[in-house]
Structures are given as C-alpha cells and as structure tokens.
Image: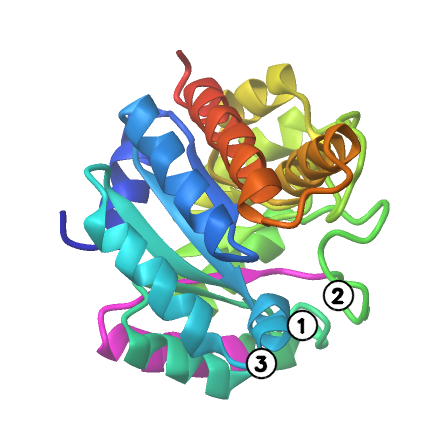
Amino acid sequence: MPLSPTDDIIGPARAAGTGVGAFNVVQIEHAEAIVTGAEHAGLPVILQISENTARYHGALAPIALASLAIARASTAPVAVHLDHAESAELVEEAVELGFTSVMFDASKLPYRANIAATRMITDHCHRADVWVEAELGEVGGKDGAHAPGVRTDPDEAREFAHATAVDALAVAVGSSHAMLTRDAVLDLDLIARLKDAVDVPLVLHGSSGVDDEHLAKAVTAGMTKVNISTHLNQLFTRTVRERLAESPAVADPRKYLGPARDAVTAEVTRLLGVLAGR
C-alpha cells in the first residue's frame, strides 16, 4: 500500500468523531511493531520520529528511510510524521525524505515569535503538500504547552491556528510528556471548548499518562490525534528485562528484542481499538 497522507488518516477520523494513534519510533523494532499492530487492528496509524530520535541515530535518514519502507509495505494505512522538531533544517529534510506530516515545536518561544516561526514552516511544507502540526505554549513562557498546570486558552488557540495556517494543533489540557503512570486528569470541558473554537484537528500529547477510559473520553470530547510513546517504551523495556532475567546467558538480541516487539504489537492493536471506540 502506498504511504498514506496524514490528512487522509486524520480527516476521516475527525469527521467520524474517532481517534487515531500516533506512536513514536525509537528503533526499527518499534516501527515494525506499530505497523503490525495496525494491521491486526485493521486501522490506520501514524509512525512518529522525533528530533531526539534523529539525534540518537546520528541523523534522520537511517531511521526515517527504514520507517518509510515499513510503512509502504504495510497492508494498513500508515503515515510517517516528524515529531517535536525545533529545527527548520530538520523539517526541510523530512519533507525531502517523503514524510507526509511534521510537528514543528516553537512552543518555547514567546507567542508572537512562535506564530512567525510556525508560519514560515507551514508555508514551506504546504508547498510540498505536507501537513503541519504545531504546539501552542504558555504565553511568554519557556516550558511549552505541557508544563504542569499550563492550559491552552481557546481564544488564543483560535487566533494561533488562523495566523499560522497549521493543519492541527497540540493543546495543553492536563497531560504531560514522559509520564510513567497513567493517572493524568484531563480537562474534558476545555477539550470541548477548544474543539468549538479551533477549526483544525486537536492533538493530545503526553497520552502515555492517560488511562483507557480517559483516552476514550478525550476523543469523544474532541481530540483526534493521540500521541503515545513512553507507555510503549515501558512495555518494551519491561519485556526485555523479563527475557534477560529468564535467560541471563543469552547473547542473541533477537531473543529479547523479538518478544518486546511482539508485546508492543499487541498493545498498539489494543490501543487503536480504544481510540476507535471499539
């Protein structure tokens, strides 16, 4: 199946009031697990590669080209997305490689500077038919939209989305990045008000900290794209630890990475069902 444009995945889900899982790739096993999970679920999925992951691999291209190949070979609709890019040069490289969407994160900048930087990225990406997500951070702050206690103002979100011409907006409604427990309390009323205020799909970052019940409620309230990373990384790492504890003399990494990949596959299948309202 050809690589899916991100809008072809997000648009129908938004119209149907369902959610789409966007899961982060750290290494090739993650990409394989996420895509296989989508195939098992019979649902679309978004593979995300962050600027941090590109830095870990020494460059974007190696992990990106592998993920793009896995996506194109899938029987499920799969989009490949650049996540939390702060570098315009990295965005340009992702566009050249064939990513169908990017998330440009200028949320640490003051509000007007965020608008200016994001609009430049949007103009560049739209010329290449690449979908753009942005994040609205705290006005004048440096901690971004997911610092503790930060919430997105609906009126400001409306103005920001219009001024930047972005295709989706990540908003702060109570979740935080890299949470190790699934006990975040989301402001569902705020999500509903943001949905009414903003004429683009809403994105929930930090969704690893949200349990199944509240993920489903967030989608019902108005979230469409749901980013999950740490939760899958915990599962992957826990499975590796268990396999190494069972067989401490094992030398072949396939003996522990394979089961970890399978565990992530099963969880992706399950989470996609939760987001789709099954």
Mark 2 to mark 3: distance in Å?
A: 33 Å
Label 1 element class = helix
Color encoding of the figure: rainbow
What is the span of residues highlighted in magenta in the rendered image? 117-137
**Farthest residue toward the right?**
148
Looking at the rendered structure, which numbered label has been put on residue 111? 1
- Kind of residue at disc 1: Tyr
What is the C-alpha distance between the residues marked 3 and 1? 31 Å
Task: Please say whether residue 133 is one of the residues in the magenta stretch.
Answer: yes
Viewed as shown, does residue 205 lie left or right of 150?
Answer: left
Q: Which residue corresponds to the image point at 35% horizontal and 35% vertical from the top-left?
A: 36
Q: Is residue 163 magenta?
A: no
From what the image shows, is residue 254 above or below residue 120? above
Determine whether label 1 and label 2 are within 8 Å by CB.
yes
- The dot on residue 139 is 2
User: Where does residue 126 sit, x and y in percent of width and height?
Assistant: 28, 73
Provide the secondary structure element on which disc 2 rests. loop
The C terminus, quarter of image: top left
Q: Nearer the viewer, residue 69 or 174?
A: 69
What is the residue that sits farthest to the left in this orientation? 1
User: Dot 3, crowdedness within 10 Å: few (<14), some or many (≥20)?
Assistant: few
Give the image quarter of residue 276: top left
Mark 3 falls on what kind of element? Answer: loop
Side (left or right) of 209 relative to 115: right
Residue 68, percent from left and from top = 31, 61
Above or below, comparing residue 13 to residue 273 in the picture: below
Q: Which numbered disc flags the more N-terminal residue, 1 or 2? A: 1
The numbered mark, 2 or 3, whose residue comes first in the sequence reads 3
Give the residue number, with chain letter if any, for mark 3. 58
| Quarter-of-image position of residue 187 | top right
Mark 1 burial class by Cα count in 10 Å: few <14, some 14-19, many 20+: some
* Residue ID at (48%, 49%): 29
